[in-house]
Image: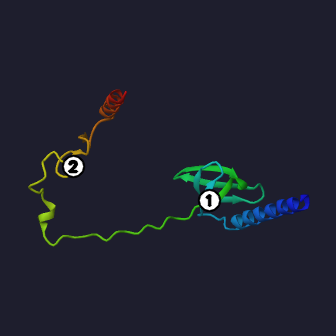
Amino acid sequence: MLGVFVFMMFRRNKKTQQQQAELQSKFGPGVEVMTSFGLFGRIVEIDEAENKVVLELSPGNTATVHRQAVTKIVEPVATVEEPTVVPDDASSLTLGKTEEPGSAVGGNTVAGDTPRHETPDETLRRLNDEGKKDS
């Protein structure tokens, strides 16, 4: 039983090392990655001698991390664009008779009568008022 346990432990370690080596072989400048602590960035430079990777987190912001901290290559998400439907006439571009000027389509409000363009102070006041109603 102990022999089987030791064999399984060595097998798991070998698999992990193979996966890590495969991941490290895919590293190169321009590859989007994620670190073990949740930072996303693009590899700018790899220092093999000191096991360091320079990541660009956002334009102009870089971070240097240990090579083993990079744990995942981020694959770009494929998005399917929906075809644009162009109406044959301009009737769909005007306000319909059943819609009211204050509705979500024709007016300046969205569902729940929340103004679209409110200042940060107004937003804070509205959220505080909603919190008082719930309590």
| Picture coordinates of residue 56, whole percent (x, y) | 58, 54
The extreme front residue here reads 1
| Picture coordinates of residue 74, whole percent (x, y) | 58, 61
Sequence order check, earlier mark of 1 and 2: 1
Which class describes the residues within 10 Å of circle 2: few (<14), some (14-19), or many (20+)? some
Which residue occupies 33% across, 34% down?
A: 120
- Relative side of 4 to 116, left or right: right
The extreme right residue here reads 3
Counting every numbered tag in the picture gives 2
Q: Report which quarter residue 20 is drawn in.
A: bottom right
* Residue picked out by circle 2: 104
Q: Nearer the viewer, residue 3 or 64?
A: 3
Which residue occupies 62% across, 59% down?
A: 43
Q: Secondary structure at mark 1?
A: strand
Label at residue 124: none
The residue under label 2 is which amino acid type?
Ala
The residue under label 1 is which amino acid type?
Ile
Q: CA distance from mark 1 to mark 2?
A: 44 Å
* Residue picked out by circle 1: 43
Which class describes the residues within 10 Å of circle 1: few (<14), some (14-19), or many (20+)? many
- Relative side of 106 to 76, left or right: left
